[in-house]
Image: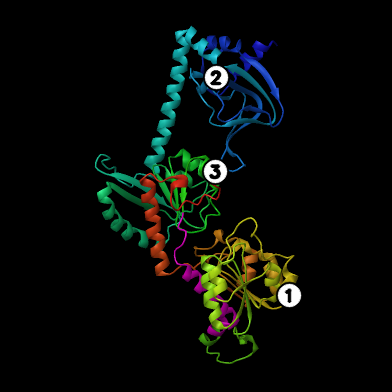
């Protein structure tokens, strides 16, 4: 079989655009095609380069990547199946047309290449060819428009259309909306919109209980922004879908953003803003509360007394916090407040942080190494953010370094603690008690009622059954003052975005890379 015959076979077997063209067109196009075989990793086209060729796949897989501000590119999609094409629409451009993404071979591939200039010459040589191509593009346009309209009608029909000449309405879909979210945001939005009237703007927020994921991202069709919480998952696939359905902003109603792929968000042009601080006192005070609950066996004592058991025994024995050594790992805003509270107990305060806080030093804190924290502390507070270097700070290797019988308190992020290591520490007595408001696999359980279901997570079940563990479900932030601040800052973040503050220019952006 000649190369032209091979090329013609590829075109006739295509399920894409080429397969719908006339036999005459296919025969003419096959004469323009040249075959290319490439190995894994071969780059056919780089993002930003002028597209000068169209590639028609015979076998193998092509991947399209878009570069973000970080080193790791984001996978846009894959091209599979005989006759599928990349660069088809670029071929109609007579001027410089930079590539949207980089095209790379995944494994060995066989590809047929056509120069863009040859495609244009073919179309202009025969008016019927041009009409065929135009008809095919019109069909695709109608198809995609119908899909987009259906998505908007299906998932965004609860808000009546507004007169855009009169007011600029930003529609926002709020994921993971429990009662406190709906009851807090609804009156606040009404009041906020009154203040926006003079700017000619309005925020309309819809609420859904589903959490954000790659499966639920499509629900945001017709919304310019979404509002997310700590257990919503905005990975690269989710963000790609959000971008496709028209979402331009993620308003995170929390300080943490470790479940948002910021590289993907920047790659797809989404602005991400958070609430950098609400009530740091709430979280710090909760840490102290958990310490006292663990140390003084409050939960056990309460349950006994509720059952009319008023006896005292060693099961309720605690210790004086006064005179003990307390280690605080992480002395940012919340950690510093906790330090100021705990020194009131008359403790020896030692701290660890990559950035030393002068206020903590003034309060009597002394900065030491992590190893000294482990070896000396009767109580350890984890107050650090969850970052790659801090993940599983508590792990099996460091357990022997801990002072025997230490009490561990975590109101920061569940991922700071390796749960299996924690359970081992409790089993051996290396850790005498734990107070935690977070859990590393909490997204499957927290903020939901599991009382009528069996929990499949054996580690969580072990924690719940351990009388030396006091576990609360991520409620440290949950005070009236904090909720009010979360709501007001989230609405301000949405307003700032509506006023053109995007990307790095948004005052509460959470882009963890340096400005360029």
Location of residue 480 in the rendering, given as x and y in whole percent from the top left corner: 40, 69
Write down the region rendered in magenta.
274-302
Q: Secondary structure at mark 2?
A: helix
Q: From the image, which quarter does the N terminus lie in?
A: top right
The tag on residue 428 is: 1
Rounded to the nearest whole Å, what is the CA distance between mark 2 and mark 3? Answer: 34 Å
Q: Which residue is mark 2?
A: 19
Residue at 59%, 31% in the rendered image: 102
CA gap, disc 3 and disc 1: 43 Å
Say left or right for 210 vs 349.
left
Q: For numbered disc 3, what is the local secondary structure? A: helix
Residue 207: in magenta span: no
The answer to which of marks 1 and 2 sits earlier in the sequence is 2
Contact check, label 3 and label 1, Cβ < 8 Å:
no
Q: Residue furthest top?
A: 125
Residue 64 lies, in percent from the top left, at: 59, 33
Structural crowding at the residue carrying mark 2, measured as other residues with C-alpha within 10 Å and reported as few (<14), some (14–19) or many (≥20)? some
Magenta stretch holds residue 285 = yes
Residue 441: x percent and y percent?
60, 60
What residue did someone put label 3 on?
264
Provide residue 19's location: percent of width, then percent of height. Answer: 55, 19
* Type of secondary structure dominating the magenta stretch: helix
Category of crowding for the residue at label 3, using alpha-carbon neighbours closer than 10 angstroms: few (below 14), some (14–19), many (at least 20): many
Residue at horizontal 56%, vertical 9%?
28
Q: Quadrant of residue 469?
A: bottom right
């Amino acid at each position: 079989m000649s190369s032209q015959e091979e090329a013609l076979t590829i075109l006739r077997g295509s399920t894409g655009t080429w397969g719908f063209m006339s036999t005459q067109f296919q025969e003419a196009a096959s004469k323009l095609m040249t075959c290319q075989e490439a190995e894994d990793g071969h780059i056919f086209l780089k993002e930003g380069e002028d597209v000068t060729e169209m590639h028609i796949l015979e076998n193998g897989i092509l991947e399209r990547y878009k570069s973000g501000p970080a080193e790791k590119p984001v996978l846009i999609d894959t091209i599979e199946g005989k006759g599928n094409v990349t660069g088809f629409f670029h071929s109609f451009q007579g001027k410089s047309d930079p590539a949207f993404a980089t095209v790379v071979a995944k494994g060995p591939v066989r590809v047929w290449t056509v120069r863009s200039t040859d495609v244009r010459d073919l179309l202009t040589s025969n008016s019927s060819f041009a009409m065929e191509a135009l008809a095919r593009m019109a069909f695709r346009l109608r198809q995609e428009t119908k899909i987009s309209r259906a998505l908007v009608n299906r998932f965004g029909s609860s808000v009546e259309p507004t007169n855009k000449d009169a007011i600029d309405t930003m529609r926002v879909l709020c994921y993971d909306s429990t009662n406190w979210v709906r009851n807090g945001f609804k009156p606040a939005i009404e009041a906020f919109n009154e203040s926006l009237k003079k700017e000619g703007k309005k925020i309309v927020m819809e609420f859904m209980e589903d959490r954000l994921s790659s499966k639920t991202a499509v629900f945001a069709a017709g919304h310019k922004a979404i509002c997310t919480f700590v257990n919503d998952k905005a990975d690269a696939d989710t963000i790609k879908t959000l971008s496709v359905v028209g979402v331009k902003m993620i308003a995170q109603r929390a300080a943490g953003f470790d479940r948002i792929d910021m590289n993907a968000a920047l790659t797809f042009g989404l602005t991400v803003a958070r609430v950098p601080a609400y009530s740091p006192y709430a979280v710090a005070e909760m840490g102290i509360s958990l310490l006292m609950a663990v140390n003084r066996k409050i939960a056990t004592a309460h349950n006994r007394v509720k059952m009319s058991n008023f006896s005292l025994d060693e099961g309720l024995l605690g210790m004086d916090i006064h005179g003990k050594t307390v280690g605080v790992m992480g002395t940012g805003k919340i950690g510093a407040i906790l330090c100021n509270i705990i020194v009131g107990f008359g403790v020896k305060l030692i701290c660890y942080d990559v950035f030393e806080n002068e206020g903590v030093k003034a309060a009597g804190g002394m900065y030491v190494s992590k190893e000294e924290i482990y070896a000396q502390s009767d109580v350890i507070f984890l107050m650090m953010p969850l970052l790659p270097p801090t993940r599983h700070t508590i792990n099996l290797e460091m357990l022997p370094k801990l002072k025997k019988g230490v009490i561990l308190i975590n109101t920061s992020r569940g991922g700071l603690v390796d749960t299996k290591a924690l359970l081992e520490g409790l089993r051996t007595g290396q850790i005498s008690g734990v107070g935690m408001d977070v859990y590393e696999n909490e997204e499957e359980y927290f903020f939901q009622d599991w009382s009528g279901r069996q929990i499949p997570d054996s580690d969580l079940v072990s924690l719940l059954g351990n009388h030396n563990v006091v576990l609360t479900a991520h409620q440290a932030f949950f005070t009236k003052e904090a909720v009010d601040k979360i709501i007001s800052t989230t609405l301000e973040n949405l307003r700032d975005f509506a006023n053109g503050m995007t990307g790095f220019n948004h005052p509460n952006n959470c882009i963890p890379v340096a400005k360029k």
